[in-house]
Amino acid sequence: MDDGDFGEVLVAGYLALLALAVLTIILILRCSGSQGQGHPPAQGLARELAAPPVPVPLPYFLYAGAADTLECAICLEPVRPGQLCSKVPSCRHVFHGDCLGQEPW
């Protein structure tokens, strides 16, 4: 490699380092500028996690279906027509009203 090529490689290396430094500074400024506004995101998340969940009571109904077609998900006994029951909407498990009253759901 002659001296002319070495000089060009050296200049190209310096320019690449300069471009990398400028991009790094821009990235740091953009990231630090967004956190300076309001509360950091971690505080908002901590506040959400600290709030206790609000329990939603399950609706009760009198079972009107056929006998022995459903069983209580707690005691595993059949649900009989006319018994007070409750059903979880998301999974559709059915419970006797008395079984739900025995545990703090």
Image (cartoon, helix red, strand yellow):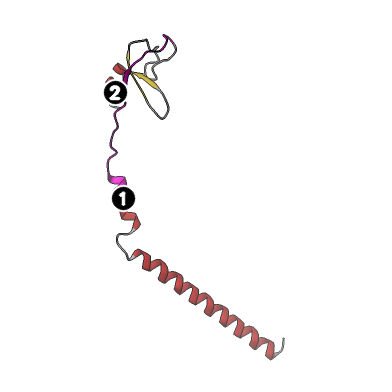
Residue 88 vs 31, above or below: the answer is above
Q: Is residue 60 left or right of residue 14?
A: left
Rendering quarter of residue 43:
bottom left
Q: Secondary structure at mark 2?
A: loop
Residue 88 vs 53, above or below: the answer is above
Q: Residues within 10 Å of mark 2 (few under 14, many from 20)?
A: few
Q: Name the residue type under label 1.
A: Ala
Query: In the rendered structure, does residue 18 fall within the stretch colored magenta?
Result: no
Camera-side residue of 37 and 102: 37
Give whichever of discs 2 and 1 has the lower sequence position: 1
* Magenta part, dominant SS: loop
Q: Residues within 10 Å of mark 1 (few under 14, many from 20)?
A: few
State the residue at coordinates (37%, 16%).
Answer: 75
Q: Is residue 15 left or right of residue 91?
A: right
Q: Position of residue 99 (x, y in %)?
A: 31, 18
Residue highlighted by disc 2 = 103
Q: Is residue 17 left or right of residue 78?
A: right
| Magenta segment | 45-68
Query: In the rendered structure, does residue 57 fall within the stretch colored magenta?
Result: yes
Residue at the front extreme, as displayed:
64
Q: Secondary structure at mark 1?
A: helix
Q: Name the residue type under label 2.
A: Glu
Residue 54 vs 101, above or below: the answer is below
State the residue at coordinates (33%, 66%).
Answer: 36
Q: Position of residue 105 (x, y in %)?
A: 30, 27
Rendering quarter of residue 80:
top left
Residue highlighted by disc 1 = 46
Q: CA gap, disc 2 to disc 1? A: 30 Å
Camera-side residue of 85 and 23: 85
Camera-side residue of 11 and 30: 30
Work out which quarter of the rendered image holds the N terminus and state it: bottom right
State the residue at coordinates (30%, 18%).
Answer: 97
